[in-house]
Amino acid sequence: MRCARKKGPTSFALVLLQETRAQAVIETAVAVPVLLVCALIAYNLALFSAASARFDRVAPDVVIAQAVSPSGDDVSSAADAVAEELERAMGGYPVEVEVREEDGEKAAGASVLSLVAAPRTYVCVMRFNPWPRDFSVAGVRAGIPAVLVRERAVTIDPWRSGVIA
């Protein structure tokens, strides 16, 4: 009489199956941090692109509205007013806005017609701080030291209101 044995996986097949499962866990543990870093980079670049598009669209309008006829004789107050309005317009984004004014006369040197107002150039600078700025993993501090910068120069003519030269 023969003894009937049940057919089933051998011990070698079980070991091979367990090694395959363990390999997938290790591959996942290695791939997930890399994928998270790539996702953070893509998120920050998309946010910077959206902020740059808004900044490029809003900066000339704000300069025309605020800097063509500044209140008072102080030109720096016009640059401050432009900076305030740009900060308000860029409210939803993690950006810092700086505005500096360059006089056309200063750039060209002293001229004979110093009484004639030269075109003024307002240089609007947007600095984008990527997220997350600082973080700590297992006691090791890390962060993103880079700051992305977008610059937009708008030249206005003081003799023609609302005209960009």
Image (tube, rainbow, N blue to C red):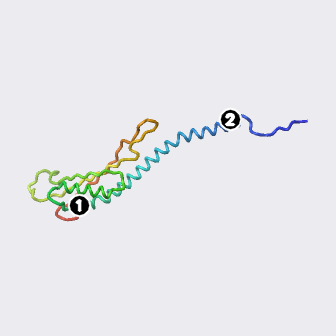
Where in the figure is residue 58, as x and y percent of width and height? Answer: 31, 59
Q: Nearer the viewer, residue 82 or 112?
A: 82
Residue designated by label 2: 15
Q: Nearer the viewer, residue 123 or 4?
A: 4
Where in the figure is residue 6, as x and y percent of width and height? Answer: 81, 39
Q: CA distance from mark 2 to mark 1?
A: 75 Å
Secondary structure beneath label 2: helix
Quadrant of the image containing the N terminus: top right
Q: Say whether residue 4 is left or right of residue 34.
A: right
What residue type is disc 1 on? Gln
Of callouts 2 and 1, which one flags the residue occurring earlier in the amino acid sequence?
2
Residue designated by label 1: 66
Q: Nearer the viewer, residue 73 or 48?
A: 73
Identify the residue at image location x=54%, y=40%. Answer: 29
Where in the figure is residue 42, as x and y percent of width and height? Answer: 44, 49
What residue type is disc 2 on? Val
Q: Give the vertical position of 30 relative to 58 (above or below).
A: above
Q: Say whether residue 10 is left or right of residue 24.
A: right
